[in-house]
Image (spheres, helix red, strand yellow):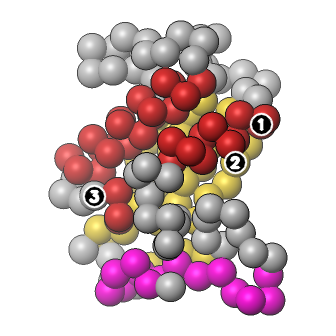
Amino acid sequence: MSSDAGVSLLSPKSMHEPRGYSHVAKVASKTLLFIAGQVALDASGNLIGPGDFRAQTQQCFENLQAAVEAAGGSFRNIVKLNVYVLDIAKLPDYREVRDRYVDVNGPPASTAFQVAALFRTEFMIEIEAVAALP
């Protein structure tokens, strides 16, 4: 499936059916934007959602949206997400929030990692992204 000209999000039939992501993001003739890992800090540097995974995930996506928009794009331009969580059992909560931001009919390629710790003990999730801008 293509999300726009120059970007194809694919899940070959010879691979397992992905759940909420695409296996492949093919980008041609675009400017790639790499967004550093985002955590649950607001514009003032305050932690949003202490101990609340969904609230922290929401803030991560708000930060990603602000970053891609600052570069002249939108969430539709995101082609790859990497998510780092302390508890992989929280992925259904992550997906519920994510699906409010991504095109669920052509979701970006994604990878999820369970990690032992993030750079501050109060963070429960960190998300980084790659976007393809015209």
Quadrant of the rendered image containing residue 59: top left
Percent of width and height locating residue 94? 60, 40
Q: Which residue is mark 3?
A: 74
Look at label 2 and name its amino acid.
Ala
- For disc 2, the neighbor class at 10 Å (few under 14, some 14 to 19, many from 20) is few
- Report helix, strand or loop for mark 2: strand
Q: Which residue is mark 2?
A: 112
- For disc 1, the neighbor class at 10 Å (few under 14, some 14 to 19, many from 20) is few
Q: Nearer the viewer, residue 26 or 59?
A: 59
Look at label 3 and name its amino acid.
Ser
Look at label 1 and name its amino acid.
Ile
User: Distance from label 2 to label 3 (Cα)?
Assistant: 22 Å
From the viewer's perspective, is residue 41 above or below residue 6?
above
Q: Earlier in the sequence, mark 2 or mark 3?
A: 3
From the viewer's perspective, is residue 33 above or below residue 52?
below
Q: Which residue is mark 1?
A: 88
- Report helix, strand or loop for mark 1: helix
Percent of width and height locating residue 105? 50, 72
Q: Residue at (70%, 48%) from the top-left corner?
A: 112
User: Distance from label 1 to label 3 (Cα)?
Assistant: 27 Å
Q: Nearer the viewer, residue 82 or 107?
A: 107
The magenta segment is 2-15
Report how many numbered discs are placed on residues in the image.
3
Q: Is residue 91 left or right of residue 35?
A: right
Is residue 84 visible from the viewing direction of this image?
no
Q: Nearer the viewer, residue 114 or 48?
A: 48
Q: Residue at (53%, 10%) from the top-left corner?
A: 50
